[in-house]
Image (cartoon, grey):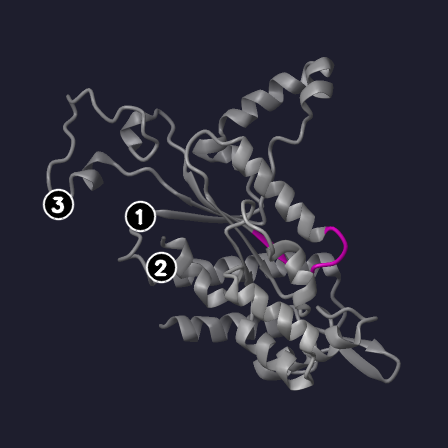
Amino acid sequence: MSIAQLRREYHQRVCEEIIRLQRDGETGYPNFADRGNRASRAIAHGIVNRLGCSPNYEKLSGQTAGGLFETITKDFLEQAFALLGHLRPGEWYYSTQSPISEFDQYEHLANLEKIVEQDNLLASALGTDYIITPDIVIGRWPASDEEVNQDRIVLTAGDPLAKFTPLRKANFERPCPIIHASISCKWTLRSDRGQNARTEALNLIRNRKGHLPHVMAVTAEPLPTRISSLALGTGDLDCVYHFALPELQESIAEIGNEDQMDMLMILIEGRRLRDISDLPFDLAT
């Protein structure tokens, strides 16, 4: 199995399970396009045609589409990242909608939340939105000493060394995974949805104890000018990934929309937008 094959299967699932045509009079437009925006509809149609999606007018709510997008993207990443095990070995944990307090760097937030909930003065002063629930989380389980010593003796049981690192399973009575990546999935980008991802990123940055996980976003939004609301700038997110970037670029070129193409190239050349096939490799860094 190759990344290209997994990408095709990923798009096949997206086509079959998520993409629908919504009626607008006698015409239809894909359910990740903006009904009132001609460019959005044309670009989305181009992506759908290039992915080979069959027309499907069955109704699907936006919330359901978003949940499916999370699950299908998580499954793709789990399979694709497994192909790179020789580059990034370890025992990995994949989940959708898991609170960050389940992971080593943010475990302390569960205790903090309990204390704040019992004191209105603290709640009013500090707020209560400590524990976020990312769309997709990837964690790594701590390693046993047998794994550490697999090729050579690195540690012995009597050594008073490396007693606090979360990567060593022997250091904890109840080991929990170390969060490696937090991935926000946005089927579309409308109004303030991009800002929600930035808010989650700032929470991860400010409240961690330990290293910062990868903070990423995946979207199917067809308009680069809207993707820019999430992708432009640095400091919050590592990068934004499009579920079908080459198909997006070809679709914009086909309709000759210079404004959208200019913004797309700014995002790509500025290293702020990549394809979904790049994401497993970036997770291995």
Identify which amino acid the numbered label 2 is placed on.
Answer: Ala
Image coordinates of residue 79 in percent, x first then y, are: 41, 62
**Gap between marks 2 and 3 measured at Cα:** 22 Å
Q: Quadrant of the N terminus?
A: bottom left
Amino acid, disc 3: Asp
Sort mark 3 into few (<14), some (14-19) or many (20+) by Cα contacts within 10 Å.
Answer: few
Q: Residue at x 54, y 45 (%)?
A: 235
User: Dot 2 surroundings within 10 Å: few (below 14), some, or many (20 or more)?
Assistant: some
In the image: residue 24, left or right of residue 203:
right
Identify the residue at image location x=44%, y=64%.
278
- The residue under the point 49% across, 29% down is 107
The spot of residue 175 in percent (x, y) is 37, 31
> How far across and how far down the image is residue 146, in percent?
19, 38
Q: CA distance from mark 1 to mark 3?
A: 15 Å
Number of other residues with Cα within 10 Å of mark 1, as a class: few under 14, some 14 to 19, many 20 or more = some
Q: Which labelled disc corresponds to residue 82? A: 2
| First of labels 2, 1 by sequence position | 2
Q: Which amino acid type corresponds to the residue marked 1 in the rendered image?
A: Gly
Numbered badge on residue 90: 1
Highlighted range, magenta:
184-192
Give the answer, above or below, for where 186 lies relative to 198.
Answer: below
Which element type, helix, strand or loop, lies under badge 3?
loop
At numbered mark 1, what does the secondary structure look like: helix, strand or loop? loop
Q: Quick one: label 1 or label 3, which is nearer the N terminus?
A: 1
